């Protein structure tokens, strides 16, 4: 995201319409603990034409009220994100997190970061604690493959763009020797009391 002075000529209302049209933020389905899912598609984010002020306004007016007082989890699709096209920047990410109301942060159960790149993991290892304040950072979990996400999210209740499945096929062709499943940047082991997961959420300090 950019500052208003560096954006292409597009009004705030047009920016909001674009965010809605692209369905970048969508409340859809539940995870296996019964929490609502907020799906965020990074690849579709028009960082060059949408300001952080508009994003915060859209979230405050359209998304957070729709969550009501329910517990929720975020599924962030990092698949296909390109730093020059759709990465919002450090300042913007921190602004969005800081603008999230405390009662919303308190109801946030987990953040599932699907298909993290090595660069994104390194970036968040360095700056994650500064960006994701209010306890959000400790809820961040990297998910390397869809099969691990389905251990915690109801598969039939969330739509995945076709490019996510295309990326999965690419990973099948070049599958790494080890696949860590779901991890965070912090030392912990999580066990759900209501679901018996096949994969524990754990931390690997290495980013490779």
Image (spheres, rainbow, N blue to C red):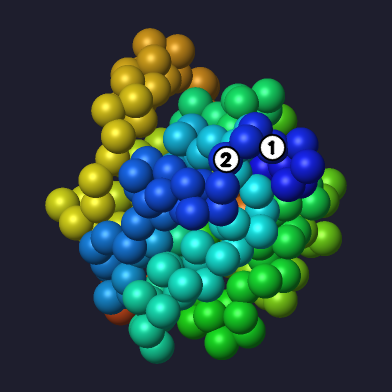
Residue 191 visible, this orientation: no
The structure residue drawn at horizontal position 41% and vertical position 68%, both measured from the top left corner, is 62
- What's the CA distance linking mark 2 and mark 1? 8 Å
The structure residue drawn at horizontal position 71% and vertical position 76%, both measured from the top left corner, is 134
Residue 30: x %, y % from top left:
27, 66
Q: How many marks?
A: 2
Other-residue count near label 2 (Cα within 10 Å), few / some / many at <14 / 14–19 / ≥20: few
For residue 111, side relative to residue 150 (left or right)? right
Residue 127 visible, this orientation: yes
For residue 134, side relative to residue 181 (left or right)? right
Residue 105: x %, y % from top left:
58, 78
Secondary structure, mark 1, is loop
**Vertical comparison of 145 with 51: above or below:** above
Secondary structure, mark 2, is loop
Quarter of the image for residue 9 reads top right
| Quadrant where the C terminus is found in the figure | top right
Could you say which is closer to the camera, residue 94 or residue 147?
94
Residue 206: x %, y % from top left:
74, 39
| Quadrant where the N terminus is found in the figure | top right
**Vertical comparison of 117 with 58: above or below:** above
**Vertical comparison of 60 with 45: above or below:** below
Q: Residue under circle 1?
A: 7
Q: Residue under circle 2?
A: 10
- Determine whether label 2 and label 1 are within 8 Å by CB: yes
**Vertical comparison of 39 with 21: above or below:** below
The structure residue drawn at horizontal position 24% and vertical position 63%, both measured from the top left corner, is 29
Other-residue count near label 1 (Cα within 10 Å), few / some / many at <14 / 14–19 / ≥20: some
Could you say which is closer to the camera, residue 124 or residue 57?
57
Q: Nearer the viewer, mark 2 or mark 1?
A: 2
């Amino acid at each position: 995201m950019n500052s208003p002075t560096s954006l292409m000529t597009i009004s705030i209302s047009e920016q909001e319409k674009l965010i809605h049209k692209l369905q970048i933020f969508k409340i859809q389905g539940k995870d296996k603990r019964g929490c609502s899912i907020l799906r965020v598609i990074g690849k579709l984010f028009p960082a060059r034409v949408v300001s952080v002020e508009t994003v915060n306004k859209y979230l405050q007016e359209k998304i957070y009220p729709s969550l009501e007082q329910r517990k929720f989890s975020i599924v962030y699709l990092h698949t296909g994100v390109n730093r020059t096209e759709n990465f919002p920047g450090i300042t913007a990410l921190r602004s969005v997190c800081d603008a999230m109301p405390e009662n919303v942060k308190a109801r946030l159960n987990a953040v599932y970061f699907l298909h993290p790149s090595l660069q994104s993991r390194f970036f968040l290892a360095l700056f994650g604690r500064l960006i994701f304040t209010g306890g959000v950072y400790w809820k961040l979990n990297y998910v390397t493959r869809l099969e691990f996400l389905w251990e915690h999210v109801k598969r039939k209740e969330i739509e995945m763009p076709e490019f996510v499945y295309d990326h999965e096929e690419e990973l099948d062709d070049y599958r790494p020797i080890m696949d860590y499943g779901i991890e965070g940047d912090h030392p912990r082991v999580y066990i759900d009391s209501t679901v018996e997961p096949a994969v524990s959420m754990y931390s690997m300090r290495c980013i490779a």
